[in-house]
Amino acid sequence: MNTGYIMNYSDKRVAFTTLGCKLNFSETSTIARSFKELGFKRVDFKELADVYVINTCSVTDAADKKSRQLIKQAEKQNPAAFIVVIGCYAQLKPDEIIKIPGVDLVLGANDKFNITRYLETLQKHEKGVTSTCQFKDIETFNHAYSYGDRTRTFLKVQDGCNYFCSYCTIPLARGKSRNPSIKSLVDEANEIASKGTKEIILTGVNIGDFGRSTGETFLDLIKALDEVKGIERIRISSIEPNLLTDEIIEFASVSNKIAPHFHIPLQAGNNQVLELMKRKYKREVFEERVLKIKSLMPHAFIGVDVIAGMSGETKEYFEDALKFITNLPISQLHVFPYSERSNTQAIGIDGKVPVSERKERARYLQSISERFLRMFYEQSIGQITNVLFEEQRDKSSMVGWSDNYVKVEMPYDAEKVNKTFSVRLTGTNDKGNMKAQFID
């Protein structure tokens, strides 16, 4: 480990790649800034680098596999590179990762923000080093926000989870629910605004649980952020239905900044399966939340997470869930085939669904999602909305997002990037994005 001598890395190149959630992206961006402070030049992950940092996800077996593939890719690109693995996979399975050829350093939840302390000559380790801890010892909240990657910023407002759903390893990877003060987050939001960013997306593991560390509430937080000057739009990322209160929905409906866009994890549309999952609500609560949103914000976008083929989900339960889901005014489904995770209670549940059947159910749900999204876009034609346009590598066109999460594509105009304009939605193009006309 670095003994305190500050080295100059101005001739060194570092590359990052991130898997998983928006929270991971906010953390990678913050970690990258610590490398920049030491003089590193950041390059694309596909380029030759002296240090590769892989921020992993472990929500499914597929995520673990993708993480291993990226590690091997980095080692192949530069066998002499110093390879660091962080994130949920690193916290949960460090002994598995350190055996992968080329890995020098595996850091768990408490140490991932301290990578630069482990840097010395960047010489490959004969034997990789791991630094992780038990999930009960993950207590620190590390502030993080993304910057420089896009027009929008992901602001980390909460970390960890106390729920221990039967299928999920996130509490083991992220620790207990915790958060910083509202004041500190408002300060960060002001800093973000001073850099010219127009939109903030609030991220965390269980953001509706905000306030557990400070005695505040998520409603208090969004009310405070709503007052930040320079920020035009605030999005609420995934929030549990039992924590999405009437007061939050009502405030969002009258706020000038809170976007009419909600991402609510349902996970299962059948109460028996929800009970097996150890979720904190019944489907009737979820339905109430969705209908409340639509009653106050008819044009609101509602995205929903669903797991297909959880152990114990019989065909009858699945058909019951389909009937429930298809009768709700949902805009899009985010579908995941159930994936067994070690150290979870769900492994012991009877009624294992064959993998082929899980995939088939997921495909069916995905087809429903495509229909939902197509209907939502069709219903949006003719509406006037505000769109924040983003920088694109392909200068032939530019895309932006409306406040209610409609993706709009128009001819490229550099003068309109990172600015909000009123447009009238006119139809969809061959990519499925909305076409529009500027409103003078």
Image: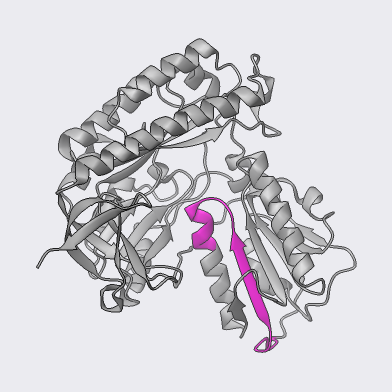
Residue at the extreme front of the image, as rendered: 430
Query: Which residue occupies the foreground of this view, 182 or 16?
Result: 16
Q: Is residue 225 magenta?
A: no
Q: Residue at x 63, y 49 (%)?
A: 88
The image shows residue 373, relative to residue 356, as above or below, that is below
383 vs 102, left or right, is left
Residue at the extreme top of the image, as rendered: 316
Which quadrant would residue 58 be assigned to in this image? top right
Q: Position of residue 435 (x, y in %)?
A: 25, 56
Q: Is residue 25 magenta?
A: yes
Q: Position of residue 272 (x, y in %)?
A: 48, 14
Q: Is residue 142 visible?
A: no
The image shows residue 353, relative to residue 423, as above or below, that is above
Q: Residue at x 57, y 24 (%)?
A: 309
Look at the image and tell me in which quarter the C terminus lies: bottom left
The image shows residue 376, relative to residue 324, as above or below, that is below
353 vs 397, left or right, is right
Q: Residue at x 67, y 34 (%)?
A: 341
Q: Position of residue 108 (x, y in %)?
A: 68, 55
The image shows residue 234, relative to residue 398, as above or below, that is above
199 vs 97, left or right, is left
The mark total stands at 0
Looking at the rendering, the stretch of residues picked out in magenta corresponds to 6-27
Query: Which residue occupies the foreground of this view, 129 or 134?
Result: 129
Look at the image and tell me in which quarter the N terminus lies: bottom right
Q: Position of residue 63 (x, y in %)?
A: 64, 46
Colouring rule applied to residues? one colour
Q: Residue at x 52, y 68 (%)?
A: 30
336 vs 269, left or right, is right
Q: Is residue 122 visible?
A: yes
